[in-house]
Structure formats: C-alpha cells, structure tokens
Amino acid sequence: MSQDFWSFCLSRLESELPPQQFNTWIKTLSAEAGTSDEPSLRLFAPNRFVMQWVRERYLKRIAELGEEFHGGPMPLELVMSEAGNTRAAPRTVAPVMPVAAEKTAANVAPAPVAAPAIIVRAEPEPTASSADLAYEKTRLNPDFTFDTLVTGRANDLARAAAMQVAQNPGTSYNPLFVYGGVGLGKTHLVHAIGNAVYKRNPRAVIRYVHVEDYYADVVRAYQQKSFDAFKRYYRSLDLLLIDDIQFFNNKNRTQEEFFHAFNALTEARKQIVITCDTYPKDIQGLEDRLISRFDWGLTVQIEPPELEMRVAILQKKAEALRVELTDDVAFLIAKNLRSNVRELEGALNKVVAFARFHGRGISLEVAKDALKDLLNAHNRQLTIEHIQKTVADYYKIKVADMHSKKRTRVIARPRQVAMWLAKDLTPMSLPAIGEAFGGRDHTTVLHACRTIADLRLADQQLNHDVHVLTQVLRG
Ligand SMILES: Nc1ncnc2c1ncn2[C@@H]1O[C@H](COP(=O)(O)OP(=O)(O)OP(=O)(O)O)[C@@H](O)[C@H]1O
C-alpha cells in the first residue's frame, strides 16, 4: 500500500539526507495514499516555499523510490496543503488520479489505465511578482513568524530578545546567539526575525542560511574562483541568519570566511543571528576567535517546553492544518512527547494522516491507535537509577553518593540536580524520589527542586548542566 510506501520512503530519505534537510523539508510534508489496488501518493507541502524546494530537490528521488517499492511506476503528486494555500481559493482534496496532461520533465509516458505511469504533478506556481522574488531570495519560510510561535517559559527570553532584534536590527544585540536542543524552535525563531524585519522594511537585504549551505557556498566559490563575489554578497547583507553553527566543526576555510564576514557585518552595524545546539564555549572544533565574538552580543537559550506549552503548540499546529483537536487528544500527545517540538508535530501529522486514511474523525481512540508504537516506547519509563548514574557520570562522582549522607557541595549539588531531573522526567512522587535517594524525606526533595529551579536562573553553568543532562536522558 502507498501508505507503507511513504513510511519506506521516509526511512530511505532519512538515511540518505543530512538530518537538517530531512527534518526541514521532508518531515513537513504530509501524505495521502491511494489504495492497494491503485497505489498512488499525494504529498502536501505546508506552503509554497516548501513546495518549491521539495519539487526542485527531492521529488525526482521520491518518484524513483516509488518505482523501486512498487516494482513499477506510481502516480505521485505534490500540492500545497489547503492551509498553506493562501493565494488560491481553498479547494477540496480529490482522490489522486493519473493526470497525464500535467507531466513534468521527470515523468515517463502517459498513464495506461492498468499500469499507471509515474506522474509527478507539482502544482503550477502562481505568478510571482518582483516583490515575491525578492522575498524568496531571503530563503525565509513565511509560516515561521512570531505569530505562529507559541510562547512559554521555555522560550520567552529568547522570543523577547528576538523581537527586540527584529525591531532594532544591528543595534540591540549583535550577534544574537540562540541555543537549545534539537527541534525546539530555533529555526522558527530566526525566520520570525527575518520575516518581521522584511515586513517593516521590504528593501532590507536578508539571508537565511543553514551552515551546510554556507559551507557549500564557500566550496563553490573556491571551485569557481569566485571568492570576490561570495565576499561581496555576504558582506552586503543587512541581516544574516545563520542556522546550526555547530556544523562548522573543523571546517577551517569556512570558519575563516565567516570570521571576516562577521567582522565586516558587525562593524557596519548589520545584524547577525546565530543558532546552535549548544552554548558557544561548548561548540566542538570552533576557533576561539569566533567563540569569543559570539559572546559580544546576547546569548539566549530555548528549553524544552512544559506540558501546557506543548498542548498550546499542538493546538496552533492543528489550527494551521485546519483540523479540530480536542483537549484530550492534545494532552495525550503532549504528555508522551516531551523533549522535541518537531516530534510533537510529527505525532500530530501521524494522527491526522491515520484518521484520514481510515476515514475516521480525530478521537482519543484514533490517536492511541495511530501512535501505538510511540506510546509503547514511551511507556518504557526512564528509571531513577538511570538518572542517578547519568548524573554521577557527568559530575564524576560515585553513584553511591546519590544515596549517601555527604553534604559537601561537590556531591550535594549533583544529588540535587538528579532529584530535580527525577521530578521533571518521571511521574514519581516526591516521597518516592526521596526514598530512592537514600531514604530522604519528601521535604528534602522539594527543597532540592526549588534550589535547582532558582539556581538555573542565576547560574549559567548549572543551567547548562541541567540542559545537557535533560537532553541526554531524553535521548
Ligand atoms: N514555540 C513554538 N511554537 C510553535 N511551533 C514551534 C515552537 N517551537 C518549535 N516549533 C515547531 O517545531 C518544529 C521544529 O522547530 P525548528 O526547526 O525551529 O527547531 P530547531 O530548534 O531549529 O531544530 P534543529 O536543532 O533540528 O535545527 C517547527 O515546525 C517549528 O515550527
């Protein structure tokens, strides 16, 4: 069945593409399958930007995988989802039919009725104005705005700083350095800055670039001996948004170029926004002179969202997909996926696709069915022993110290961190946690949790430790 094909296709593309590309482009697609008798696949892109990118870079490969999976061609269509289709009038989704008239170069012969051809029908683009074209050069995703970004404790500082930068680019915090774990909205936030700056000033020269693409630009400039043009371009920007700087590791020539671009832009009071999965000093293989420059502006963290925020994000995403999501379903998903918003979204997409495929509405029952594997995996709970061992290893103390009565700071603080993590990451009660830490009283656990919560606001190193440990434990 084509639904199985899409799972097959996802796992193949995941192994073939760098994670950033897979997550940004492929995972945002939703799929609607034909029947087992008449396999077909219709892919929905959330907006024109994604549709164009997928069509140019990945559609041919998806068609090849379709042929490999089915042992023959399969009609394949890429359209914009209704929610993303802001230019055209909303249309109803019809079953996929082989539409020979709309073939593209990637196609083969017209479809005979019995054995359908691969028909790659990418929706024709609406005519673009020169303003549209200028906008597209920014590489900004129009869906990633401050309006679509849900705010909560996990990101309010980062969001406030980003809004400040968007209002006063080049003069408030330069660079703005945003760090946080995978899939927590860093890319969304930097696109939001770009979109806001563009809205205020459509003449601003803005460029969003992932580090891997920046690296590719350097390589191309090197091969084509076009370094002057490369330098001129990057130094002419008003706003440079550069994503996932951790992938700069040991790419010395690229770092060198970036160093000079950074200096030129900051000297000219042009804004730079950087994202990374970690705090600047912890980036592996990055030159010290870059690390020290990243400290010039403001460094803000995005943390994993708490339950209420996760529910709000799901509701927002459901709104964008134009599906109704009841609170019980939102809570089921949010309670089981804690660490990564992208996974949260993936789970929602899975529920929506499952409901559509089986012609059912979205209910708690449907959601449980759709997410069966995921819920089973989640139920293999994190144990307190695992938390104690991970924290002890991290701080290089003995696991036995988690249970001991020793009160020296080097031991007591990691123990408090482990208690805080146990409270945050497991459903255990305070008395049960106290018991697991050498039979301590629940008030001791409460005190530990409050101490760590307060210290995280005041002590950047401790906050960082807790962040790293949380990521490690959540896998
Ligand atoms: N606070 C939020 N509100 C709404 N959507 C969010 C929020 N945080 C994350 N998302 C969504 O989660 C998905 C993943 O976010 P994004 O790609 O920005 O994460 P990231 O931190 O850049 O990840 P990576 O480390 O893989 O680059 C996006 O679709 C984004 O819109």
Image (tube, rainbow, N blue to C red):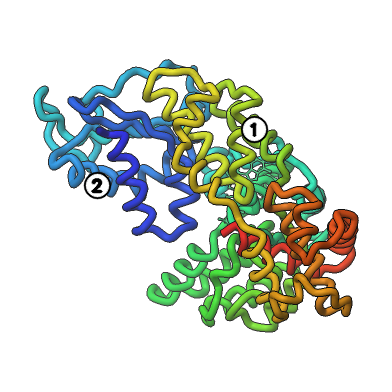
Q: Residue 399 in the image: x percent, y percent?
A: 69, 75
Q: Residue 45 in the image: x percent, y percent?
A: 44, 35
Q: Residue 225 in the image: x percent, y percent?
A: 42, 76
**Which residue is under mark 1?**
331
Front residue of 474/377: it is: 377
Q: Badge 1, how many Cα within 10 Å: few under 14, some, many 20+?
A: some
| Kind of residue indicated by mark 1 | Phe
Residue pictured at 43% horizontal, 76% vertical: 222
Relative side of 359 to 185, left or right: left
| Kind of residue indicated by mark 2 | Leu
**Which residue is under mark 2?**
65
Q: Is residue 388 visible?
A: yes
Tell me the element at label 1: helix
Front residue of 315/24: it is: 315
Q: Indicate yes or no: mark 1 CB to ligand 1 under 8 Å.
A: no
Q: CA distance from mark 2 to mark 1?
A: 36 Å
Disc on res. 400? none
Front residue of 455/445: it is: 445
